[in-house]
Amino acid sequence: MKLFKKKDSSFYWYDFNVRGTRYRGSTKETNRKRAEKVAALKLSQTIERRDPLDKKSPSLLEFSTRFFDWIDSAVLAMKSKKYYRNGWRLLSKTKIVGMPIDRIVKDDVERLTFPRSAANANCALRTLRRMLHKAEEWHLIDKVPKFKLLREGGRTLRLDDEAEQKLLVAAEACGWTQHKFELFRDVLILARDTGMRNQRELYQIRIENLDWKNRIIFVPDSKTPDGRRMIPMSDRALEILQARVGQRGDGWLFPSKRSKSGHMTDIGKQFRAARLKAGLPLHLVMYCTRQDFGTRVLTKTGNLPAVMKTMGHKDVRAAMHYQHPDLEIVRAALNQPNESSSKPSA
């Protein structure tokens, strides 16, 4: 085992090999004797973790069976489980699935390419990272390679009035039952007029949390602590909610007998069908209703704190991701004559 100092570090570093695998890292110690003890401990721990008979490491594909058995039994949000399944769907189409998990290094990960957006690629990369961390936890690999996620530009599309009308016209032409069309229409309008997060908030509205007297929707649980909030009902939101509730006094707004949760969980299939028939871009998703809500309310009120409170945001930077400033307002301001420059000089 070698102990040394790097030019740019005040700490001692260790460097050793165990059965053909190199281990190198900082001891986080500036005293040589203490560094020697840390390095010896690292070597001992590494040898203890390694099987003395050196079993063949499973490929990522072989390991995926055990990983998803754990995913299915783990206490994870259903959304997280779906996320990892989708990430694996993307990973399974790459060559990395055939590699032994103990041979996957940073360069292998950085060569991976995935279709469509950076968010799509990051879904696959986060899944890979979670898989490798579980492999490390189960002593199948010694160290998880460090790799970066891609930079995401964020959503730029708004699901505005025009997009809403196109989607509803297309939905009517899809040949759905009246019940399915009305459900799609009501969810779309409520999403636009409340700015609620789809799965965590909108689909889980309970009748007990509707304040008819004050025309308020109470959100008791959300993605963040600040997500617990009250949202005013617009006129058309009130009309839809009253029609949906009828004479019921409690329960889910969107009940579902087929869902384990008892409420509707997704209309993604219908949305994609209507979007395709309407000829709208693929990156227009249901969540774009939230972008539109923030932009509309901020443009009409100019009150960012009120928008943040209604949308459940605490951080201004996070809130600004949802605001798409109306360029026409900026253009109109620029075209207005400057009063000081228009005054005649003395």
Image (tube, grey):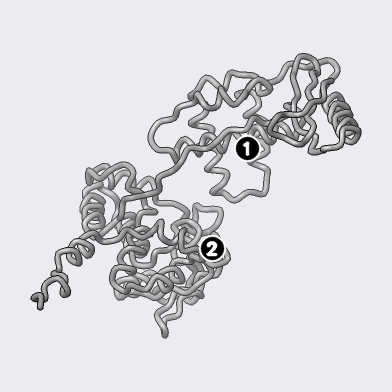
Q: CA distance from mark 2 to mark 1?
A: 24 Å
Rendering coords of residue 295 (x, y %): 32, 63
Quadrant in the picture for residue 22: top right
Could you tell me the amino acid type at mark 2?
Ser
Question: At x 64% / y 40%, what residue is drawn?
Answer: 71
- Residues at marks 2 and 1 touching, judged by CB atoms closer than 8 Å: no
Q: Which residue is mark 1?
A: 130
Q: Earlier in the sequence, mark 2 or mark 1?
A: 1
Q: Secondary structure at mark 1?
A: helix
Residue for badge 2: 222
Camera-nearest residue between 147 and 137: 147
Q: Is residue 80 above or below residue 186?
A: above
* Residue 93 makes an appearance in the image: yes
Could you tell whether 192 is left or right of 149 in the image?
Answer: left
Q: Amino acid at mark 1?
A: Arg
Could you classify mark 2 by the number of other residues whose Cα lies within 10 Å: few (under 14), some (14-19), or many (20 or more)? some
**Count of numbered circles on the image:** 2
Q: Position of residue 87 (x, y in %)?
A: 52, 36
Q: Nearer the viewer, mark 2 or mark 1?
A: 1
Is residue 187 in view from this perspective? no
SS state under label 2? loop
Camera-side residue of 203 and 121: 121
152 or 130, which lies in front? 152
Residue, x 54% and y 59% (percent of image)? 223
Asked if 8 appears above or below 1 in the picture, the reply is below
Kindly indicate the quadrant of the structure image that contains residue 328.
bottom left
Percent across and percent down for residue 41 are 88, 31
User: In what quadrant of the picture does the N terminus appear?
Assistant: top right
Label 1 crowding class (10 Å Cα cut-off): few <14, some 14-19, many 20+?
A: some
